Amino acid sequence: MPNIKSAIKRVKVEDKKNLRNRVIKSRMKTSIKNFDAAKAGDENLEALYRNAVSMVDRAASKGVIHDNARDRKKAQLAKAFAAKKA
């Protein structure tokens, strides 16, 4: 544990940000897994797709993932959605 007051504060702030980032990333991964687990005939397939894309966008807007990672994940989701619909 640091002795300097500013270093103590940095540790606290980093812990808060780390927790927030882990929660956001976990929600994103869960929504993607739920979409991947859905079958082709599910009636809520489009809702799961929209939710997954929304969570990916939210993670990128908060800086948890990079913009290129967002674009890559959205492209992968769109490709999988098109394959499941067909």
Image (spheres, rainbow, N blue to C red):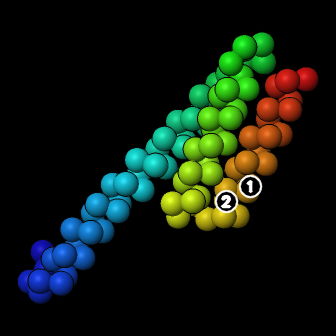
Residue 80 relative to residue 34: left or right: right
Q: Tell me where residue 2 sits by quadrant.
A: bottom left
Q: Residues within 10 Å of mark 2 (few under 14, many from 20)?
A: few
Point out residue 73 in the picture as x, y percentages from the top left corner.
70, 50
Amino acid on which disc 2 is placed? Ala
Q: Identify residue for label 1.
A: 72
Q: Residue furthest right?
A: 86
Question: Residue drawn 76% across and 45% down?
Answer: 76
Q: The residue under label 1 is which amino acid type?
A: Arg
Q: Is residue 67 above or below residue 80?
A: below
User: In this rendering, is residue 11 above or below 30?
Assistant: below
Q: Nearer the viewer, residue 35 or 59?
A: 59
Q: What's the distance in space between the residues labelled 1 and 2, CA to CA?
A: 5 Å
Query: Would residue 57 be found to the left or right of residue 3 on screen?
Result: right
Q: Residue 5 location in percent, x, y? A: 11, 83
**Residue sitting at x 24%, y 76%:** 10
Tell me: 12 left or right of 5: right
Q: Which residue is mark 2?
A: 69
The residue positioned 42% from the left and 56% from the top of the image is 21
Tag 1, which secondary structure? helix
In terms of image quadrants, where is residue 60?
bottom right
Kindly indicate whether the residue at mark 2 contacts the one at mark 1 (C-beta within 8 angstroms): yes
Q: Position of residue 62 (x, y in %)?
A: 51, 60
